[in-house]
Amino acid sequence: MDRLGRQGDRVLERSERTSVTALPRAASVLAVCAHPDDESFGLGALLSAFDEDGIKTSVLCFTRGEASALGAEREDLASVRAAEFEAAARVLRVRRQRLLSYPDGALAGVDLDELVAHVRRFGSEVGADLLLAFDEGGITGHPDHIRATQAATRAADADGYPVLAWAVPDEVARALNEELGTGFLGRRREEIDLVVTVDRSRQIQAIACHRSQSAGNPVPRRRMEMTGLTEWMRWLRGGPTAQ
Ligand SMILES: [Zn+2]
């Protein structure tokens, strides 16, 4: 059977879709993101799943996404995206969110200690006991994503947080890159610590809130179609496999 076809859009084999484990236990999850929409396009299903499990969720986002090529014709893109972020956070039932104003597209040039201090401060304010971030390669290789995850892991090293990273399966990354010319960086099954079943309904609503980025953008929809109702995660710090 061709892995990429004949069974519809999903590219994962059945065995890879059914090895499901539960979300880790936590009281308060803090997601650390680079751009408004990362919490929805990337982490939306997981934030929603944590909420459904009765776990409080919060989001720290370092930039207002003003450098996006999507919506670049709008002079007020930063404020548009800030409003979209607030709306998406409500849909995802995020309890607290903090949107900072570091330069979009240049986060890698910002002093890492400064970013780490924001994570540590907000983590303390929301009583976080688990950090959620993008995979170390930044999922799409975007330097801002990589920097946000570095800030999360460095904060974890200082304060002892476990860090869970959202990852994209290799097959999905390759299929997306082939079909849409994207630059997704996938992970092999053996690099994955947790595979969970998710309900994407809130994520889909949250993505729609980011209208400036999602209208006419096929990538999030195709990625969700290919991945199906599962999300893959890796422990970057802490977790059962690292203790
Ligand atoms: Zn992003």
Image (cartoon, grey):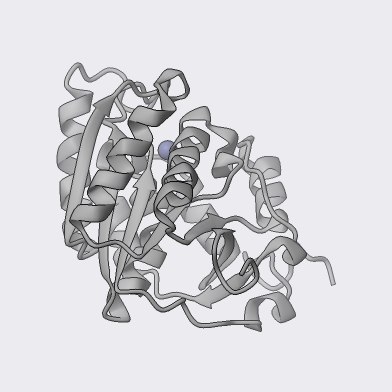
Q: Nearer the viewer, residue 87 or 235?
A: 235
Residue at the image position 56 percent from the left and 82 percent from the top: 21
Residue at the image position 37 percent from the left and 26 percent from the top: 68
Asked whether residue 47 is in view, the answer is yes
Q: Nearer the viewer, residue 241 or 78?
A: 241
Q: Quadrant of ligand 1?
A: top left
Image coordinates for residue 63, horizontal then vertical, percent: 30, 31
The vertical placement of 15 against 221, above or below, is: below
The vertical placement of 37 against 237, above or below, is: above
Image coordinates for residue 238, horizontal then vertical, percent: 54, 64
Residue at the image position 32 percent from the left and 81 percent from the top: 53
Q: Nearer the viewer, residue 218 or 241?
A: 241
The vertical placement of 237 against 146, above or below, is: below
Q: The N terminus is located in which quarter?
A: bottom right
Left or right of residue 143: residue 76: left
Question: How many numbered discs, if any?
Answer: 0
Left or right of residue 179: residue 129: left
Q: Image quadrant of residue 198?
A: bottom left
Residue at the image position 41 percent from the left and 45 percent from the top: 155
Left or right of residue 237: residue 173: right
Asked whether residue 36 is in view, the answer is no
Image coordinates for residue 221, horizontal then vertical, percent: 46, 54
Q: The C terminus is located in which quarter?
A: bottom right
Left or right of residue 167: residue 119: left
Q: Image quadrant of residue 47?
A: bottom left
Image coordinates for residue 138, horizontal then vertical, percent: 55, 40
Q: Nearer the viewer, residue 9 or 142?
A: 142
